[in-house]
């Protein structure tokens, strides 16, 4: 149900402010075309590839232009819509990506922000029909979706405020990326020369140059590798309990995201077998390439927490190895090179098993050097973590502005 609007605002159907583009082109064999796609979750229109027309199967396509509104019939229910940016002017899109001219009653910036809201995405989901993975937007019903329309000058002011919020978020994201790049450079130096400098004697190992004085040994000599619990098992009797567990989504590169913890059923007598202990290094087995061997240290944040079978828990022998040093080694170029070489790979996917993790060729300086090296990298992590807190704060501010400005509860 549409909520009440301030004076001067009105509800309009989408078809009142956008209309289907009629610019359809015939693909010519000897001409090169920029082909686009629209990313889910309002991540924009992006170039998919450029190729000659003779390699393009669909010969009639939409020619798109800067400032047009474009949406994916299949993924509209997942927020796949955007305004065409200048760099994709004159690109082409199949009819699975309906394209619309925006009329003078609505500002493209305002339209862009409103169509990123949950309310709009839900409306697209409601007018999509079909099976779960192939549900398609019904275009007649799409045109009937209602949106709130302020006066044009207020639309422009709303868009300007939200663009400023986006600019603040982008500034912090750039700072995070720069800090992460600095950290990678420091890691590269530390895991090549240790605490020394470029004059330190090194040797060529299988996955990069390493200090001569560091020992190498399989990880299993200095750590226990614990596998996790699988979901959906048949327990065949016995007392079953529900406990919190770490999923792949919780295990990020260099930190644990514990904002959403789910529960899993296990037998009561399995709790000790699968429980995480403070100091465990938790690592993902893979999936997408960026998930391969990523993770960090469990500090006992949640009592009686276990881990799923796609996450390993590495419990080190602290007489020889510190968890923090191991976590950083796994993050390093050396660690990533090993996991990529050992992993079973398909297109954009890779995974390791417990045997490959046990065989990881551990670089082992003495404990004092491990502690000093980890302390250096912890300083960089603390800086990055502070930036992430600022980033989340700015995102929260933007969410509040979106809710207030796009509903008319906050005026500018």
Image (cartoon, grey):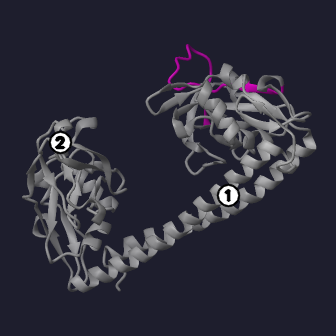
Q: Residue at x 67, y 41 (%)?
A: 333
**Type of secondary structure dominating the magenta stretch:** loop
- Magenta segment includes 109: no
- Image quarter where the C terminus lies is bottom left
Camera-side residue of 271 and 38: 38
Does 199 sit left or right of 383 as displayed? right
Camera-side residue of 200 and 169: 200
Magenta part of the chain = 222-244
Q: Residue at x 69, y 42 (%)?
A: 332
Can residue 409 be seen at all in this image of the molecule?
no
Of pointers 1 and 2, the one earlier in the residue sequence? 2
Camera-side residue of 264 and 406: 406
Does 63 sit left or right of 199 as displayed? left
Residue 182, which numbered label?
A: 1
User: Which residue of the protein is positioned furthest toward the top in this rendering?
Assistant: 236
Find residue 190 and report its horizontal and vertical position in percent.
79, 47
- Magenta segment includes 234: yes
- Image quarter where the N terminus lies is bottom left
Q: Name the residue under label 2.
A: 53
| SS class, disc 1 | helix
Does 406 sit left or right of 144 as displayed? right
């Amino acid at each position: 149900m549409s909520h009440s609007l301030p004076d001067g605002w009105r509800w309009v159907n989408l078809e009142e402010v956008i209309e289907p583009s009629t610019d359809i082109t015939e693909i010519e064999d000897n001409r090169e075309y920029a082909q686009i796609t629209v990313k889910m979750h309002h991540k924009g229109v992006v170039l998919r590839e450029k190729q000659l027309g003779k390699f393009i199967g669909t010969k009639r396509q939409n020619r798109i232009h800067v400032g047009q509104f474009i949406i994916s019939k299949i993924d509209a229910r997942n927020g796949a819509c955007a305004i065409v940016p200048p760099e994709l002017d004159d690109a082409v899109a199949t009819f699975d990506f309906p394209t619309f001219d925006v009329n003078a009653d609505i500002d493209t910036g305002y339209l862009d922000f409103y169509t990123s809201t949950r309310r709009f995405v839900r409306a697209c989901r409601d007018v999509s029909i079909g099976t779960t993975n192939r549900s398609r937007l019904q275009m007649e019903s799409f045109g009937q979706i209602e949106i709130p329309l302020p006066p044009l000058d207020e639309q422009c002011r709303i868009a300007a405020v939200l663009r400023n919020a986006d600019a603040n978020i982008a500034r912090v994201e750039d700072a995070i990326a720069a800090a992460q790049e600095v950290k990678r450079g420091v890691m590269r130096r530390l895991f090549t020369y240790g605490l020394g400098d470029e004059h330190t004697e090194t040797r060529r190992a299988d996955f990069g140059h390493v200090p001569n004085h560091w020992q190498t040994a399989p990880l299993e000599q200095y750590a226990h590798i614990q596998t996790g619990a699988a979901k959906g098992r048949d327990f065949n009797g016995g007392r079953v309990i529900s406990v919190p567990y770490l999923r792949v989504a919780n295990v990020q590169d260099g930190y644990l995201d514990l904002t959403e913890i789910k529960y899993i059923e296990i037998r009561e007598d399995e709790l000790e077998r699968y429980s995480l202990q403070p100091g465990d290094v938790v690592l993902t087995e893979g999936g997408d390439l960026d998930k391969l061997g990523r993770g960090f240290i469990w500090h006992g944040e949640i009592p009686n927490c276990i881990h799923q079978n796609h996450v390993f828990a590495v419990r080190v022998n602290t007489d020889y190895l510190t968890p923090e040093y191991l976590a950083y080694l796994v993050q390093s170029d050396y660690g990533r090179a090993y996991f990529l070489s050992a992993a079973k790979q398909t297109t954009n996917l890779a995974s390791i098993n417990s045997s490959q993790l046990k065989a990881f060729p551990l670089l082992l300086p003495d404990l004092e050097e491990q502690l000093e090296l980890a302390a250096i990298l912890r300083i960089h992590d603390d800086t990055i973590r502070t930036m992430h807190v600022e980033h989340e704060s700015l995102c929260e501010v933007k969410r509040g502005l979106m809710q207030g400005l796009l509903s008319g509860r906050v005026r500018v």
